[in-house]
Amino acid sequence: MNLKDYIRSIPDYPKKGILFRDITTLIKDENAFAETINQIVERSKKFNFTKIAAIESRGFVFASAVSYILKKPFIMLRKKNKLPADVHSVDFELEYGTATIEVHKDSIDHNDTVLIIDDLIATGGTAEAAAKLIEISKGKVAAYIFVINLFDLGGCDKLVKKNYKIENLIEFPGH
């Protein structure tokens, strides 16, 4: 099954000049979604990890299913002010401004090695912030698995230069 066939491309969304890669067409097809989860599970076997983390919100769709199958704890990396207990926070740059992601302080400790799962990597700012959250929590990043890599936007290259391991299922140009 070619998972690329299940990704809808929408021009000029969310703003003019952007070609948006829409995963809703992949997850609404039960066979494509199952294949995606199976591929993530299979690729995850390359890495030793104790927990799975995902970046809000589309990463939750994939990571929660993988967490269930592998029987590993699932950690949510959320937007600012969405978690009720004490948090670690990291600010990062977006193409159109800044954002903050957070994790509960009691989610990750020095014994944890964390697999980060997300739907897509573009410039890598959010993914890099996720690693910083895990590291300030005293955990280690085992690897990243992305469903989609927008290869010409440089996010994976940025992470590889920082010695992070990366897997992705599908690649598209970013524009």
Image: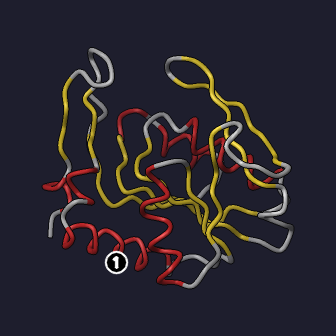
Q: Amino acid at mark 1?
A: Asn
- Residue drawn at (33%, 24%) of the image: 14
In which quadrant is the N terminus drawn?
Answer: bottom left
Is the image coloured rainbow, by chain, by secondary structure, or in one colour?
Answer: secondary structure
Coordinates of residue 109 in the picture (x, y in percent): 84, 67
Coordinates of residue 6 in the picture (x, y in percent): 17, 55
Name above or below for residue 99 compared with residue 81.
above
In the image, taking residue 120 as reference, residue 4 lies left or right, namely: left
Q: Secondary structure at mark 1?
A: helix
- Residue drawn at (69%, 36%) of the image: 80
- Residue drawn at (18%, 64%) of the image: 29
In the image, taking residue 121 as reference, residue 99 lies left or right, namely: right
Q: Nearer the viewer, residue 156 or 117?
A: 117
Residue reaching furthest front?
Answer: 84
Residue under circle 1?
Answer: 38
Coordinates of residue 97 in the picture (x, y in percent): 57, 18
